[in-house]
Image: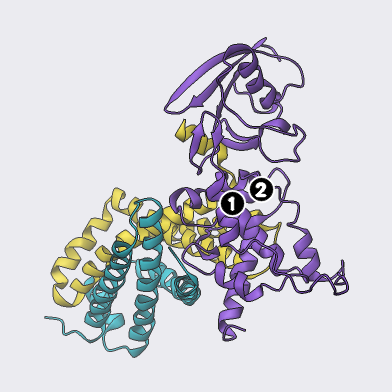
Chain colours: A purple, B yellow, C cyan
Amino acid sequence: MSTDTIRLTIDRGSETQAFDVPAYESQTVLDVVSWVQQNADPSLAYRFACRVGMCGSCAMMVNGVPRWTCRTHVSKVVEDGALHVGPLRNLPVIRDLVVDMDPFFDKWIAAEGVHHGTRTRDDEIAPVDETSPARVEANSGIECINCSVCYAACDTVAGNPDYLGPAPLLRAWTLLNDAKDAGRVAILDAVSGSGGCHNCHSMGSCTAYCPNELDPMSAIAGLKRETMKHALRGRR
Amino acid sequence: MTMVAYKNRAHPLWLAYIVHRLSGLFLALFLPLHFWVLAMAASEPGRLDGFLRFTEYGIVKAAEFGLVFGLAIHMFGGLRLLALEWLPWSAPQKTLAAAAASASFLIAALFLMRAFG
Amino acid sequence: MIGLRLYMAQRISALLMAPFVLGHLAVMIYAIQGGLSAAEILGRTQGSVLWFAFYGLFTVAVSVHAAIGLRAIAHEWGGVSGRALDVLMWVVGLGLLWLGGSAVWAVTYGVAP
């Protein structure tokens, strides 16, 4: 890097605050934000836990793009020696870089993103055919760690606050394809409501920005097809 | 920051979405005018011919080109969307979006050649 | 804001319109050759059941499609919601149907003065 400091601007409520942060090699955006909290302003609020892209708690807007800050190298996103960091879009801000994730998690429940069991503890474990098309479809979405990057990327969520959004609908699609889940009708009803999958315009920002390279847009398209088939067959 | 943020977040499928939305919006707003002028053919043909004379002007020709281009791009963009939603495809979406844009441009170019030819 | 029914109405009207749009584009390219006049339009359309069916169905489909499309834009970009959103959708749909329907009727069965 040519400059030895990074001009970091942080959204703090209605104001922004700028800091000059020493630049190092192999520095992540989370490192830069942490430097501010540890050396310049201990009152800066932000979230992180694992620092290795497993927990999904450090997501922020970096130069307008939602990213895991722990897995984003400064050198990849810095523009003319400057970085702009803000709280995730589409969620209420608690303070500084910390958002309230409740609306996002509530929508997982609203999309029936919960397990609908088929057996009791006395039954045998259900066999799962790893090669069946439904299981392949389910497997493609199970690595979601609820970081809300897709939710922050989605312009449809921004304009339509009732819309369930990419991650909750991806989970609904995963469960719909899971042989061990008995919630088929409940899921299809939940994603057909006024905030359901039919509000999606397939702009694909969820798929473009998912740090785990999952594909919520195609999952939502799958839900659109299944809900239509379900309705045309007389809700069976 | 807002405009910069949109610029930074833009990607091919998002551009296809915004083009589809804006072309649809303009077509929907143009429709009432189109119907109103067309109805004149029967009721006030003289007035319609007066309107049609305006189409000789370059600026009106350019607006017409915009409308035809908008219609074509909205239709091909819409067919792309239907394919994307109803046929379980994944990766070739960007190729489809590009093909849709080029096909609509081709039709609009054909119209333009006829209009000025 | 948009449930399964409106989604299906939107997509089915779109699918219906694809051949109409292609036909309409072809007619436009053909019709503008050598200029366009009221007499020329009426010469093509007057008394023709085929034209009436083609543009009549096109008008119905476009009214449905534009009404639902504007509903989505009004909600996402205009912040309109609830009852006002339903009213807007129906006014747009029925308004376009009325304007378009009377125009199509006028050029096929209307009497030129």
Q: Secondary structure at mark 1?
A: helix
Instruction: Say the numbered circle drawn on residue A177.
Output: none
- Where residue A213 sits in the image (x, y, percent)? 72, 48
Q: Residues within 10 Å of mark 1 (few under 14, many from 20)?
A: some
- Mark toward the start of the polypeptide (2 vs 1): 1
Give the chain of mark 1: A
Give the chain of mark 2: A
Q: Which residue is mark 1?
A: A105
| Residue A133 left/right relative to C3 | right
User: Is residue B112 visible to the viewer in this orientation of the structure?
Assistant: no
Q: Residues within 10 Å of mark 2 (few under 14, many from 20)?
A: some
Q: Nearer the viewer, residue B110 or C70?
A: C70
Above/below status of A220 relative to A98: below
| Residue C95 picture quarter | bottom left
Above/below status of A184 relative to C71: below
Residue drawn 80% across the image and 70% down it: A133
Locate the N terminus of chain A and report the quarter of the image it occupies. Answer: top right
Instruction: Say the numbered circle drawn on residue A146.
Output: 2
Q: Residue furthest front?
A: A122
Label 2 or label 1, whichever lies nearer to me, is 1
Kind of residue indicated by mark 1: Phe
Above/below status of B2 relative to C14: above
Kind of residue indicated by mark 2: Asn
Calculate the distance from the C-alpha at mark 2 to the C-alpha at mark 1: 8 Å
Decide: marks 2, 1 in contact (CB < 8 A)?
yes
